[in-house]
Amino acid sequence: MILTNFSDLTFVDYATQTGITLLIVTLSTFFAYLIGIPLGILLNITDKNGLWKCKPVNVIFGILINILRSAPFIILLVTILPYIRKMIGTGTGNAPFIIALVIAAVPFVARMVESSLKEMDYGVIEASKAMGASKMRIIFKVLLPEAKISLIVGATISFSTILGYTAMAGTIGAEGLGNIAYMYGYLRNYTDAKIISLVLLIVIVQVFQEIGILLAKKLDHRRKGE
C-alpha cells in the first residue's frame, strides 16, 4: 500500500535538509535584493514620472528584466547552470544553484521594488523637490523610507517565491527539502518524504510571512494612533 510505504529518513535528515533549504533561500534572497533594489530604483526613477526621466535606460532594463521573468524557472535553470559551473570552476555543491536562483529572482525582486516605490504619493516627492532636496537625498530619505512597509511585504512574497524555486532546483541536484521530496517522495514513492517535506515547506513560508507582517505592522507609524 502507498500509505504504508515509508523511508528510513530520520529526524536528523529532515532537520539537516531544512537547514540547507533555509541557508540557500536566505543567501539567494539576500543577493537577489542586493542587486534587485538598485534595479528597482533605476526602473522607478527613469520612468516617465520619475526623478531622472530616461526612456532608453528604462526600456532597455525593462526588456531585459521582462525576458528573464518570462522564462519558466526550471528551463532557465537547466540552461544557465552549465555555464555557471564552468564560470566558478565546480559542478558540485549548492553554490551554482544559489547563483542561478539569484539570477532568476533578481527580475522578480526588481519589479516588486519598482511597484512598491510607485505606490508612493507623488506629492511627497514634489514637496521634497520644492525644498531643494537632491535626487539622491529624495531616493534615500523619502522614497525608500516611505515605501518600507510595502518593501517588507514584498520581501515576504519574494522569499516564498525563491523557496519555491529552491524546491524545484532539488529535482536536478540542489540539496534541501525539494531534493528529499523528489528523490524519496517521487522517484521512490515514499509517502513520508512527500508529506513531511511539504509540511515543512509550508511551515517555513507561514513563519516568514508572519514575521514579515508583524515587522511591517511594527514599522507602520500610521497605525500608532489606532
Image: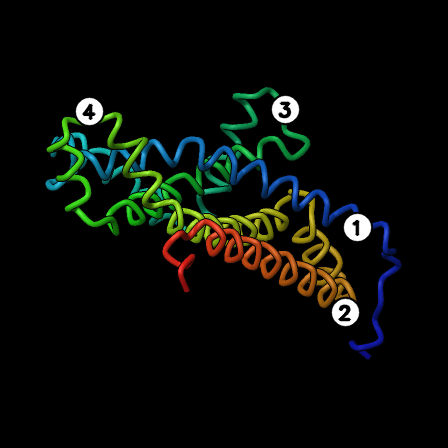
Tell me which amino acid carries mark 4: Ser
Query: Label 1: how many residues lie within 10 Å, few (<14), some (14-19) or many (20+)?
Result: some
Label 1 near label 3: C-beta < 8 Å? no
Count of labels shown?
Answer: 4
- Dot 2 or dot 4: first in sequence order is 4
Is 194 left, or right, of 101 in this rendering?
right
Residue position marked by numbered label 4 in the rendering: 134
Q: Secondary structure at mark 2?
A: helix
Is 226 left, or right, of 13 in this rendering?
left
| Mark 4 or 3: the one toward you | 4
- Dot 4 or dot 3: first in sequence order is 3
Residue 185, position as x, y percentages in the image: 72, 62
Q: Secondary structure at mark 4?
A: loop
3D distance between C-alphas at marks 2 and 1: 18 Å
- Dot 2 or dot 1: first in sequence order is 1
Q: Is residue 60 above or below residue 3?
A: above
3D distance between C-alphas at marks 1 and 4: 50 Å
Residue 85, position as x, y percentages in the image: 56, 27
Residue 191 position by quadrant: bottom right
Q: Is residue 101 above or below residue 165?
A: above
Label 2 near label 3: C-beta < 8 Å? no
Residue 87, position as x, y percentages in the image: 52, 21
Quick one: 38 or 196, which is closer to the camera?
38
- Dot 3 or dot 2: first in sequence order is 3
Is 19 left, or right, of 47 in this rendering?
right
Residue position marked by numbered label 1 in the rendering: 15
Residue position marked by numbered label 3 in the rendering: 90
3D distance between C-alphas at marks 4 and 3: 46 Å
| Residue at the image point whose x is 32% and y is 44% from the top | 146
| Mark 1 or 4: the one toward you | 4
Tell me which amino acid carries mark 2: Thr
Residue position marked by numbered label 2 in the rendering: 191
